[in-house]
Amino acid sequence: MKQCLIGKKVLITGASGGIGRATAIMMAKEGADVALIGRNRVKLDSISIEIAELGRKAPVFEADVTDADAVNRTVKDTIEYLGGLDILFCNAGVYLRCPTKELTLGEIRRVMEVNYFGTLSAVYAVLPYFIEKKSGSIIATCSMDGKKGVPPDAAYVGSKFAMNGFFQVLRQEMKEYGIHCGIICPARVDTEMIKDVECPKITPKFSPDLVAKAVIGSYLKKKKEMLVPYFSCHLLTWADALSPTLGDYLVKVNKLGGTDTKN
Ligand SMILES: NC(=O)c1ccc[n+]([C@@H]2O[C@H](COP(=O)([O-])OP(=O)(O)OC[C@H]3O[C@@H](n4cnc5c(N)ncnc54)[C@H](OP(=O)(O)O)[C@@H]3O)[C@@H](O)[C@H]2O)c1
């Protein structure tokens, strides 16, 4: 990929670290201007400086994705500042590892608020603009946890399955408006989010750059869904579709789940 995003205008939620940061920088290297959303101003500012050094614009917007009004304002400000918007990358998310019997409804709601409704607040903020101009791309970081439930992540898994389901419908409804909608489903990525999670050898943590490449690939090839890494994720998904018993068995023998309590 060489300068394949020249002049494109992008907005990324959860841009202050991990996958969001890696994608912002990779997209800027490909020629895009990138608006950065998150709550951590210090981290966002330092990424903005890095992007400015690449010769691209990177306005910073401090906003919590659970505040739909703030996200709406941010989208309007981004469109005004960058002179338009081509790609929305909904990436903000939180993780909760906790066995189901220990979870509270409040904890589950909190995860849903950020991962599911936080994604939708950004989607609904850009939708009228994309529908009017009959173009645009909405890409979201879902997860392999949105394809196959793995214990002890029920709260997180539920939020990512909800995202997956919403995007399946959204992409079909938005086709007539020329709007691309795609999800990225990574397995384990080496970021702050799962720094305390030990992974079995069969699913080692991989670089967030690999997810950033998938996001750009999703945009360029108008992909509906990208599983990262390709082979092992497809294998598990196909096995689970064939037989949930086989899917559960593969999770168990490969020790894909964990036994940790809340973190
Ligand atoms: N790491 C993995 O193994 C993995 C695997 C599959 C999918 N994912 C998904 O990838 C996405 C990015 O996660 P990551 O791995 O890069 O973790 P990360 O480094 O912890 O990044 C999470 C990002 O989400 C932002 N965020 C969290 N709550 C927010 C809120 N209420 N409002 C606005 N921003 C918020 C954080 O920014 P602030 O703190 O500045 O608000 C941060 O930029 C998440 O959706 C996650 O579910 C991760």
Image (spheres, rainbow, N blue to C red):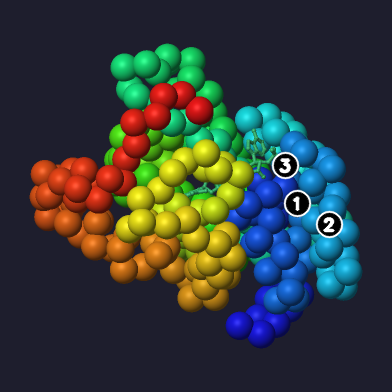
Report the residue at 53% width, 24% height from top: 110
Ligand 1 is within 8 Å of the C-beta of the residue at disc 3: yes
Which corner quadrant of the figure contains ligand 1? top right
Q: In the rendered image, which residue does mark 3 sit on?
A: 38
Q: Is residue 174 left or right of residue 14?
A: left
Image point 40% across, 29% down: which residue? 260
Residue contact at pointers 3 and 1, CB within 8 angstroms: yes
Amino acid type of the residue that numbered disc 2 sits on in the rendered structure: Ser
Q: Position of residue 69 (x, y in %)?
A: 71, 32
Nearer-the-camera pick, 180 or 60: 60
- Residue 202, compared with residue 104, is above or below; it is below
Query: Can residue 163 be spotted in the picture?
Result: no
Tag 1 secondary structure: strand
Q: Is residue 162 left or right of residue 117?
A: left
Say which residue appears at 42% left-offset and 14% top-offset: 104
Q: What residue type is labelled 1?
A: Leu
| Amino acid type for the residue under numbered disc 3 | Gly
Query: Secondary structure under badge 3?
Result: strand
Residue at numbered disc 2 = 48
Secondary structure under the numbered disc 2 in the rendered image: helix
- The mark that comes first in sequence, 2 or 3, is 3
